[in-house]
Image (spheres, grey):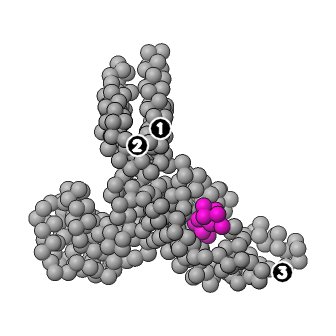
Amino acid sequence: MPRLATLLQSVGVAISKREIQRLLTEGQDGFLAENRDVLRAGLQTSPWISVDDTGARHKAANGYCTQIGNEHFSWFGTRSSKSRLNFLDLLRAGHTDFVLNHAAFDYMRSRALSAPLIARLAEQPETVFADQAAWSAHLDRLGFTALATTPDPVLIATEGAIWGSVHAHDFLRDAVVLSDDAGQFAVGQHALCWVHAERLVHKLDTFTDRNRAAQQKVRKLIWDFYADLKVFQTNPNKRRRLALRARFDRIFQRRTGFATLDRLLARLHANKAELLMVLERSEIPLHTNGSENDIRCQVTRRKVSAGTRSDLGRDCRDAFLGLGKTCAKLGVAVWDYLGSRLGVPGHPGVPSLPELIRCRGQPV
């Protein structure tokens, strides 16, 4: 804002930093609503999304900005936490309800919530709760809050009910979530970035020529395999799929004699289903480069202006970053978009961005 104030004052506009702040953050409900609807449209129509997060300062405290998007849209949300509970809440796209349905109970089972506790929830007639207060009261009535077991039954049940809400609103029904292996993003159908997987091998500390030779050989095997996965995406077939699965096992179950590398390979092999999700869903990317490129603008803002001071300022910053990125992906000039929404004479009309996303997401 100091730079904006200096620029405007240099051309003869008498304006203060406070007035610039009001212009940027007040009366922006239409933009905030459209940004929310961009996320909803993307989650409803996209066969896959990629996600990433980075540090963000808000109210002089450390927080995290999460990016969600694909080739048609990008959305940003800054919160104080980067937990899985926070990520699931972001996936509700502004809805506040908690829903107990098949998706919710499947999630609870996958997170090892005990069968008697799941049955206690399932046998209740209430399945939809309007907000956090109603949901917390329900858990308290059922005795969940008094339990001191592992995993935390309140946390797992809450995550499950939010995941149920995500499905109830028709978000991510058959979509793949592509991430860099950060644990909070491992929900639903989950795929892993190959670039981040190889980076673990690349960054491995080596101490002898034999170690370095083993490392370089494995890296070559991985990149050759990566190249063949890209070829598979252009012409997927069952025979090639089976061959690639067998080849994956040969690469990641090998023993190199370098103990640290062997343990890393075993760890990557345990992620086989997520690394090879592309064999079942050939449309998803093999990397999260798109998310990393999108979130770089947030990193730039953080370096220039440190952080936000109000919740409204934070939400406007996230919204306009997301709307700008979404316009670029949809081939819409940002100035035309702003001119259309602000009613500037001479600017062409720009359709609703959520509707454009829905059109792009329709199967050909």
Q: Which residues are magenta?
A: 319-332
Give the CA distance from mark 1 to mark 2. 8 Å
Quadrant position of residue 333:
bottom right
Q: Position of residue 220 (x, y in %)?
A: 48, 26
Name the quadrant of the N terminus: bottom right
The residue closer to the viewer here, 281 or 132, is 281
Q: Residue, x 71% and y 77% (percent of image)?
A: 348
Q: Amino acid at mark 3?
A: Ala
**Which residue is identified by label 3?**
14
Report which quarter residue 246 is drawn in: top left
Disc 3 + disc 1, Cβ < 8 Å: no
Q: Taking the image as drawn, is residue 262 in sight?
A: yes
User: Helix or strand or loop: what does disc 2 sit on?
Assistant: loop
Q: Is residue 327 magenta?
A: yes
Q: Amino acid at mark 2?
A: Pro
Residue type of the residue flagged with mark 1? Val
Badge 1 crowding class, 10 Å Cα cut-off, few under 14, some 14 to 19, many 20 or more, is few
Secondary structure under the numbered disc 1 in the rendered image: helix
Q: Is residue 150 above or below residue 16?
A: above
